Amino acid sequence: MTTLNTTPLAPLLERLFHEAAEASPAMSAAIAGFSDEERAQLMRSKSGYLDLYARLKDVPLPVSRETGALLYMLARGGARNIVEFGTSFGISTLHLAAALRDNGGGRLVTTEFEPSKVARARRNLEAGGLADLVEIREGDALQTLAAELPDSIDLLLLDGAKALYPEILALVESRLRPGAFIVADNADHSPEYLAHVRSPASGYMSVPFGDDVELSMRLG
């Protein structure tokens, strides 16, 4: 048995995934005014994404169940220090913190710029009994992750504004230990990021995982 599949976390995650599935029409309504091309441009813009994510402030934007399980498994390999870009309602955060709990403890630093989502994530972490392992930093990740990070980071999750993936990786890169994992959700919206981690000279080994994740490992 693990923290992930026992009470209180297992029923909480089931409810959150169900609510996220029910919210998908709300997501469509929130961005109904944009064409597919405009949405794609906003996802890849280093400034326009602010409008997009402001419209989606009430939408969960969770990782998939499969990605959640992947995060737990990767972190269970002995992770002690984890950084997450994009808390949203905290579904991915709960998976990562559960792994830390089952590893015997650790620290998860996560960041979210939308205050209402920070509040909901805090409530979910309290309900899941994992709040003591997580530090949520509210604000622009380019500032919140620019200082006071663990000296050695075992896992980095990128699941915020896709256009900022290269910049967030650059903030954290020097602290990634050899063998550290980087999970980038919906990385196809950040071709600059993909080009970097897939380059033989980048210091990473990187492969696509499933339909929407890029999984990379820091080589040195």
Image (cartoon, rainbow, N blue to C red):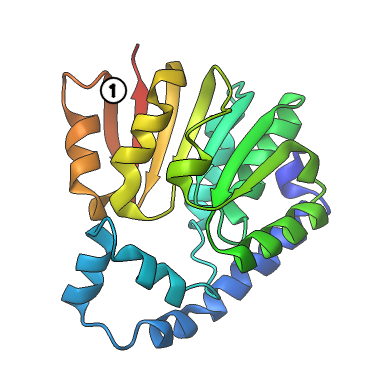
Is residue 126 or residue 75 the one in the foreground?
126
- In percent of width and height, residue 98 lies at 70, 40
The residue positioned 24% from the left and 40% from the top of the image is 193
Q: Quadrant of the N terminus?
A: top right
Q: Is residue 127 left or right of residue 204?
A: right
- For mark 1, give the secondary structure: strand
- 64, above or below 131, in the image: below
Is residue 90 or residue 215 the one in the foreground?
90
- 185, above or below 104, in the image: below
Total number of numbered discs in the rendering: 1
- In percent of width and height, residue 34 lies at 26, 83
Rendered image quadrant of residue 183 = top left
Q: Is residue 200 left or right of residue 59?
A: left
The residue positioned 43% from the left and 53% from the top of the image is 160
- In percent of width and height, residue 69 lies at 55, 45
Q: Quadrant of the C terminus?
A: top left
- In percent of width and height, residue 86 lies at 50, 52
The residue positioned 47% from the left and 42% from the top of the image is 143
Residue at which label 1 appears: 204
Look at label 1 and name its amino acid.
Answer: Tyr
